Amino acid sequence: MSDTSSSTPPPLSPAPPPVPSTGKGMSIGCIIGLVVGVVGLLVLIIVAVLASLAIPAFQRVKAKASSAQTKVAIMDLEVAITAYQAQYNKLPDLAETDEKKIVESRGLLLKIIMGRHTPNDFGFYEPPPAYTTGKGRLITNDAGEFELLDPFGKMYHLHFDWDGDGSIPNPEHPGATIPAPVIIYSAGPDLAYDTWDDNVKSWGLLEQ
């Protein structure tokens, strides 16, 4: 009699449960991956939209802050020139007579009001500290002369009452005049001197 116990096959392992189907041939894992991808894309779109809104707002705030710094710098420069005039009963001697001609914040003008033109000069002006590299400060250019830059990185423009009649032609409104010994203005955020809407000006400065 043969031993039949050795010929009995081992019991079979239970079959794995079937993967639930969506009815469209797509697994749960694929659906989850698709949802995650869509959500990620939406997040990127939202971040991009917020950035597009935030950058112009930041630029406006920065320009407004720079304009405020420019107002202070213009007032300091104007006070220094009028103090020089009160001390010596004359404007800085720049060998100039044309009141419409632009004087830039550079060279001899700065040396005179800073007291660095001759050894016996008295200083009336101390340049502002630098707000950022190359802007809002006194620099020395390649020719070795001083340049005073506004917080936007451009030199100030000035006009003087050379004939002493108490008024200067208004560069913003040709034909009009401004009652002052000196007027000063900055190109403003757009860096263009002839676009007056954003220029920072010494005349009417308190109303700006």
Image (tube, rainbow, N blue to C red):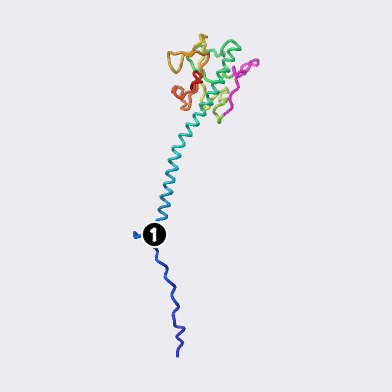
Against 103, is 13 above or below? below
Q: Residue furthest right?
A: 120
User: Is 53 displayed left or right of 139 in the figure?
Assistant: left
User: Percent x, y for residue 103?
Assistant: 51, 17
The answer to whether any part of residue 77 appears in the image is yes
Residue 184: in magenta span = no
Given residues 142 and 178, the one toward you in this image is: 178
Q: Residues within 10 Å of mark 1 (few under 14, many from 20)?
A: few
Name the element at disc 1. Answer: loop
User: Percent x, y for residue 88?
Assistant: 60, 11
User: Percent x, y for residue 74?
Assistant: 54, 21
Tell me what residue is drawn at x 39 percent, y 59 percent: 27
Given residues 132 and 6, the one toward you in this image is: 6
Q: Quadrant of residue 148?
A: top right
Residue 117: in magenta span = yes
* Magenta residues, start to end: 111-130
Where's the N terminus, which quadrant?
bottom left
Q: Quadrant of residue 144?
A: top right
Q: Please identify the dominant SS of the magenta region.
A: loop
Given residues 46 and 140, the one toward you in this image is: 46
- Mark 1 — residue? 27
Given residues 157 and 47, the one toward you in this image is: 47
Against 45, is 56 above or below? above
